[in-house]
Image (cartoon, helix red, strand yellow):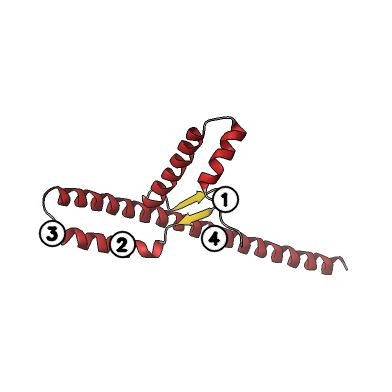
Amino acid sequence: MLRPKKAKEFIPQVANELSISEKTVEDIVTFYWQEIRKNLGTLKHPRLHITNLGDFTIKHWKIDEKIRMLEKWEENNKQKGMQQMTARFKTVENLFNLKTIKKTIEEEKERKDFIKLHKKRSNVTKIECNKNLEVKRTNTRRTNK
């Protein structure tokens, strides 16, 4: 059974290969994964591609449920003082991000539907043109005989 390797095992090797300090390599790795975590946690994009790891997409069917839950929580918030301010700020920010991402996903869906419809229409037109050509060819063959 293969044991998965951790980043800290690669840091000294990479530092030696690139002739830079281990601290620099460690800082770069830490920054990279910090940005990945931040992008996964915030709702700025509907899809996030991480090289050699894959694509992460938002579950569009759960957005409405999450919006309702946050709006309900915002109405029933019983915290006091600074906790209330902090929680309310985070909730408002999350609601804004959710609504924005929902709009982005809907626009993307409309764009895809338009493309499918356009392809379908152009294929139907091509088929009709081909049928018309075949009919003309058979008609010209009959008249030439």
Question: Residue at 11% of width from left, 53% of height from top?
Answer: 80
Spatial separation of the CA atoms under disc 4 and disc 3: 49 Å
Instruction: Indicate the secondary structure of the residue bearing disc 4.
Output: helix
Q: Is residue 132 above or below residue 53?
A: below
Residue bearing the label numbered 4 = 116
Question: Residue at 51% of width from left, 35% of height from top?
Answer: 22
- Tell me residue 46's x, y (percent): 43, 53
Q: Earlier in the sequence, mark 3 or mark 2?
A: 2
Q: Local crowd at mark 2 within 10 Å, few (<14), some, or many (≥20)?
A: some
Residue bearing the label numbered 1 = 52
Q: Earlier in the sequence, mark 3 or mark 1?
A: 1
Residue bearing the label numbered 3 = 78
Residue bearing the label numbered 2 = 66
Q: Local crowd at mark 3 within 10 Å, few (<14), some, or many (≥20)?
A: few
Q: Is residue 91 left or right of residue 37?
A: left
Give the residue type that dot 2 points to: Lys
In contact (CB < 8 Å): disc 2 and disc 4? no
Give the residue type that dot 1 points to: Asn
